[in-house]
Amino acid sequence: MSEFQLYADEFCEADQVDLVGFSCGDTKHGRYCTEWILGPDAMESIANYGTKVWIFRNATGQVVGYGSVGTVRWRWPLPDGGYASLLYIPMLGIDQRFQGQPPDAQWRYSRQIMNHLISEAHQLNCERKKPAEYLLLLVDETNEAAVKLYARFDFELIPVVTRGPGLRVMKHRLR
Ligand SMILES: CC(C)(COP(=O)(O)OP(=O)(O)OC[C@H]1O[C@@H](n2cnc3c(N)ncnc32)[C@H](O)[C@@H]1OP(=O)(O)O)[C@@H](O)C(=O)NCCC(=O)NCCS
């Protein structure tokens, strides 16, 4: 097994101690993602919406990042369809010390986390009475690392539609 292998644990209150010093960086996106996992949002999303959140650690137990999969109730197809429960990645982030690491792309942490989230989304989708056609997420178009990462995992921007403060919606076909 590679020294770069990540291990996923479902996030719980006890993980907060391991998150001391965790920071996704001093950008707008980085601060937002840091606050989501360090503040009450992650726990509230789990409690109120059944979101699944994982903490990813390396072999020495350091927290490298986190990711999540849940559902949202949006109109589908966007922007004018009927309301539906849709599969969605609410948030993910990598500690700034581990962004772009390791140099060996096969073990890149961002890709390990995306692989995990997509695989979990497929499993959740199989358990649904009415499987979703797409896994969705929101992205700020100026967040180049995120847009490139999602495109690498076959997420496509939905044309024209924006949500919230100028965020674009991306979709990844699940079936
Ligand atoms: C988004 C995030 C998870 C990506 O993880 P990462 O380790 O930085 O990802 P990578 O290094 O694999 O970068 C992804 C791609 O973007 C490129 N990239 C990285 N930083 C970039 C930048 N500033 N400008 C342009 N491209 C960039 C990389 O070269 C890579 O391209 P490749 O797939 O062709 O090699 C991480 O940057 C992060 O946590 N950011 C802050 C929080 C955040 O924005 N979360 C997502 C939205 S909520």
Image (cartoon, rainbow, N blue to C red):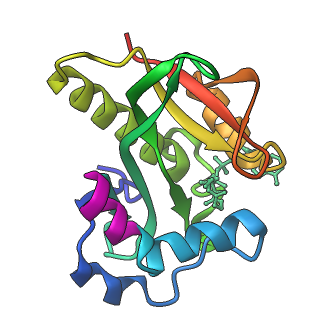
Q: Residue at x 41, y 14 (%)?
A: 133
Q: Main secondary structure of the magenta part?
A: helix
Mark yes or no: residue 17 visible.
Answer: yes
| Residue 154 in the image: above or below residue 141 | above
> What is the span of residues highlighted in magenta in the rendered image?
42-50
- The foreground one among 56 and 3 is 56
- The foreground one among 138 and 100 is 138
- The foreground one among 62 and 38 is 38
- Left or right: residue 18 versus residue 82 is left
| Residue 165 in the image: above or below residue 153 | below
| Residue 125 in the image: above or below residue 53 | above
Magenta stretch encompasses residue 49: yes
Residue 9: image quadrant is: bottom left
Indicate the position of residue 54 as horizontal and vertical percent values: 32, 58
| Residue 141 in the image: above or below residue 161 | below
Q: Residue furthest right?
A: 142
Residue 41: image quadrant is: bottom left
Indicate the position of residue 145 as horizontal and vertical percent values: 73, 48
Q: Residue at x 52, y 26 (%)?
A: 75
- Left or right: residue 104 versus residue 30 is left
